[in-house]
Image (spheres, coloured by chain):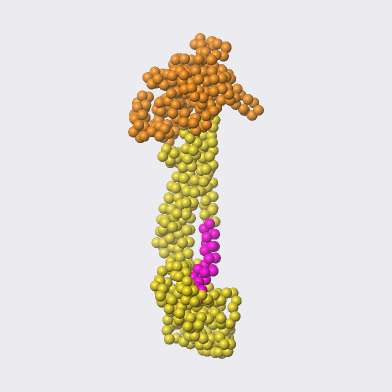
Amino acid sequence: MLLRTESLVKDYRLGKEVVHALRGVDLEVPEGDLLVISGPSGSGKTTLLNLIGCIDRPTSGEVLLEGEPVSRLPEGRRAELRRRKLGFIFQTFNLIPVLSAYENVEYPLLLLGLGRRERRQRVLGILEEVGLLDLARRRPNELSGGQHQRVAIARALVTEPILVLADEPSANLDSETGDQIMQLVARLNRDRGTAFIVVTHDPVVSRYGKRQLQMRDGKLFKFDLEGEREEKRVGYR
Amino acid sequence: MLVLKLALRNLFRNQRRTLLSLLLIALGTAALFLLRGYTAELYAGIESIYIDFYWNFQIAKEVLWEEEFRGYEYIIPREVLTRVEELLDQEPKVSSYTTYLGLTGLVGTQERSTAFFAFGVDPANPAPNLKVKEGRPLQPGDLEAALISPDLAKELKVGPGDYLVVMATTVDGVYNAGNLKVMGIFSHWGIEGNVAVVPIAFVQRMLNTDGVSRVTVKLADDRATEEVARRLQEALEASGLGELKVKTWKELAEVYHRVRAFLGSIFGFVGVVVFLLVFFSVLEGLTMAFFERIREVGTVRALGTNRSQVFGTFLGEGFFLGLIGGLAGVALGWVIGWLINLAGLTYLPPMAAEPLPLRIRLGPAAAWVPLLMAVGSTTISAIYPAWRAARLEIAEALRFV
């Protein structure tokens, strides 16, 4: 199993109040999966991605990446996991504005310490896959929203991660461009076999998933296209 | 490389802010460069004035330089002087030496008299060699001749061509008298009061001695002063002349050290002011940059960038800001200094008798301290924002709006 979470709980303290962002999430993601988790804002989707992506730690429970518990690992080791095994796509694209599209995609490879020739080969290959080879030298401020997200997808995939975590990848795009981005995600998932977890508040995006789940109040539910959901909390194994 | 590349590019993200910071750093560095170049020339000028007065070093009995001494115990007898001269003749770096003997006594005309002090020098090789502003200098063969200070000329109402009567006590305690003809009036900074410069033979006759009080030595290369002085002291001691001490001009010129300390404190004060201005300006700029880039820091950390790399990026921005601004400042200072040197301006420092050229030393020695201060202040000011950026929690940083 590529990813497994065990009874993940995440509480935040806001002053004297405790916010229960995740209330015990059990989840399994096999290799090559394209899982879409939908839910309203504040339901805990991003928190779940942060815990899976080793950028936050759970209050209790565990995340296992390829069978390895990662929640209690030291920060240096977690940074290493993020570099080598995970890819991130953000709602606001989060490209580095002072770097060109090529350099933004190259950035994770520099962190891996790859040689110039291999970096160039990989960056040009993935930029071609996302259809941005001609715009490689442009800076982010010279790109449209959809192009931004394509660069971000290329950046997430260039290290050949085992899992890409996409947080509302189409939320800042018009519906047509958002649709194109999700088609690209689905194609890359199919062609490369890379597993994706996409979280979204847009139920339409869910149709791109091989599997769909819904999140409400920090719990995961089976997705029901007719709008009904199973009230019982379920573990998806 | 990645860290440096990002640091350099981030620097020009907010061009207006960066250019303002660079301008401030460059102006501060240029000011320090000019001040340092000016003080370097000033120190060199003052050193040459002191070396001109004291020569490179002097040899005398230690008692001469003590606060109080009795009688004429400081006089170096002729036979000892001969041995000293033999040692000096053997030292290849010595270009010239001469002797000196002072006299305290009464000097007067028929109308008025006063106490005075006379420098007994060798007219053929006088030390100090004072500038004559009226009349003529002493010449070889002169015996009963004197150059007098403006104060003494005023006190006795005499000038070149007038005659003076001198009274003093010999080394044996006997009153002695002599005549002097005023040949000229000298002027020199630091020599005030009733002073005359006379041939050493006149002083020796007045004191009834063939000895001298000190031997004054000039070297071909001023930089060898300490080395030759040390070697000569060792030679004196090895020859059984340990009662004689060699003192360099730096040891004799107490005012020189006070002047240097004063100029050093001015330089230090200006340096601290510039350092603080640059420090707080860059601190503000980089702190603003930190707040503007919180989400970006979260992104690069999510991609696997280490805390140390984030720290290095912000620190690198401070470093490059200081380096670019500092180099620009040195270049600006060099151009201004070159123009000042070209203009050939002069000024009158407090202790000089005549105007000195206003010159700025433009060599690398004047550049490295201002450059180091520029780079140091900006790099240090980057530590706090760099530390804050490195400590950011990724999830919080990504949520930051």
In the rendered image, the vertical position of residue A114 relative to residue B244, given as above or below: above
- Relative vertical location of residue A199 with respect to residue B88 in this rendering, above or below: above
Asked whether the viewer can see residue A165, the reply is: yes
Quadrant containing the N terminus of chain B in the rendered view: top left
Q: Quadrant of residue B217?
A: bottom left
Q: Determine if the magenta segment contains residue B253.
A: yes
A226 in relation to B351, above or below: above
Q: Quadrant of residue A188?
A: top left
Residue B18 in picture, x, y percent from top left: 47, 43
> Is residue B20 shown to the viewer in this render?
no
In percent of the image, x 51 and y 32: which residue is there? A75
Instruction: Indicate whether residue A214 is drawn in magenta.
Output: no
Q: Which residue of the protein is positioned furthest toward the right in this rendering?
A: A16
User: Residue B373: x and y, percent?
Assistant: 49, 51
Q: Nearer the viewer, residue A147 or B239?
A: B239
Which color was chain A given? orange
- Which of the two residues, A200 or A123, is positioned nearer the viewer here? A123
The colour chain B appears in is: yellow
- Residue drawn at (44%, 26%), measured in percent from left and top? A85
Query: What predominant SS class does the magenta segment belong to?
Result: helix
Q: Which residues are magenta?
A: B244-268
Residue beneath the point at 46% across and 47% down: B322
